[in-house]
Image (cartoon, grey):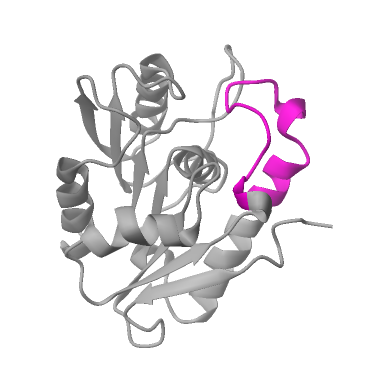
Amino acid sequence: MNAHADQRVENYGEPLDTAAKAALVVHGRAQSPEWMREFLIDRLDAPDVAFVAPEAAGNTWYPGGFMQEFDVNEPHLGWALERIDQLIGALEAAGHSRSEIFLLGFSQGACLLAEYLSRHPGRYGGAALLTGGLIGPPGTTWPGESLAGTPVLMGTSDIDEWVPLARAEATRDVFETRGAAVTWRVYRGMEHIINDDEIALVSHMLTRQAA
């Protein structure tokens, strides 16, 4: 049984049935939808967007570090990816094509969305992966099909204790190789936060017209 499947989902911004775009907003370890609302959603200048923010069971999507062996994080990682897929399916059923769906995550949420994007490639509205990277131990590779020009914003710190810069760089390279349009920012000395420049970049991603 998927421990994440019956957890609550909060809706912010424009109602889903009238919004021009939808964003799936995924919190980090020991965080919540309310945390994402305070530190991300309420800071954005993005009208006409419905924000859908699920909560993980126990407020954590998987128990171990994102660079540990996969079996350390199973079955929770598989459940988390399945939950993300269910929610994207629900957004599609509500009338939003993948090109109108955005993936916004911070920390563990950014790692989870990076992994989902790798495993479920295609053309999304965009993805903002804030202080995160692809999941797996050193030596993991992430082959797959094209991301078809999906805009991917990656912002990270050069000193983050949770997400090594080298893994964020490797994630950037994988996504560029697989056809994403990556916007890359490294913030010198940044703590484990979402900064104002990232907020401006996410706002721009959400409001610009699709190519």
Relative to 126, does residue 157 appear above or below in the rendering? above
Residue in the foreground of this view, choosing between 143 and 189: 189
Tell me where the magenta segment starts and ends, as one range.
59-81
**Residue 139 appears in the picture as rendered:** yes
Q: Is residue 103 left or right of residue 19?
A: right
Residue 67 sits inside the magenta stretch: yes
Quadrant into which the C terminus falls: bottom left
Relative to 50, does residue 150 appear above or below in the rendering? above
Q: Position of residue 80 (x, y in %)?
A: 65, 50
Relative to 171, does residue 61 appear above or below in the rendering? below
Relative to 203, does residue 94 appear above or below in the rendering? below
**Residue 125 appears in the picture as rendered:** no
Q: Is residue 138 left or right of residue 209?
A: right
* Quadrant housing residue 161: top left
* Quadrant housing residue 204: bottom left
Residue in the foreground of this view, choosing between 156 and 128: 156
Quadrant into which the N terminus falls: bottom right
Q: Is residue 152 left or right of residue 98?
A: left
* Quadrant housing residue 67: top right
Q: Residue furthest bottom?
A: 18
Residue 88 sits inside the magenta stretch: no
- Give the residue displayed 35% in from the left and 67% down from the top: 100
Q: Position of residue 49 (x, y in %)?
A: 29, 72
Q: Position of residue 169 (x, y in %)?
A: 35, 20
Q: Residue furthest right?
A: 1
Q: Position of residue 110 (x, y in %)?
A: 44, 41
- Give the residue displayed 69% in from the left and 57% down from the top: 4
Q: Is residue 81 left or right of residue 31?
A: right
Residue in the foreground of this view, choosing between 114 and 10: 10
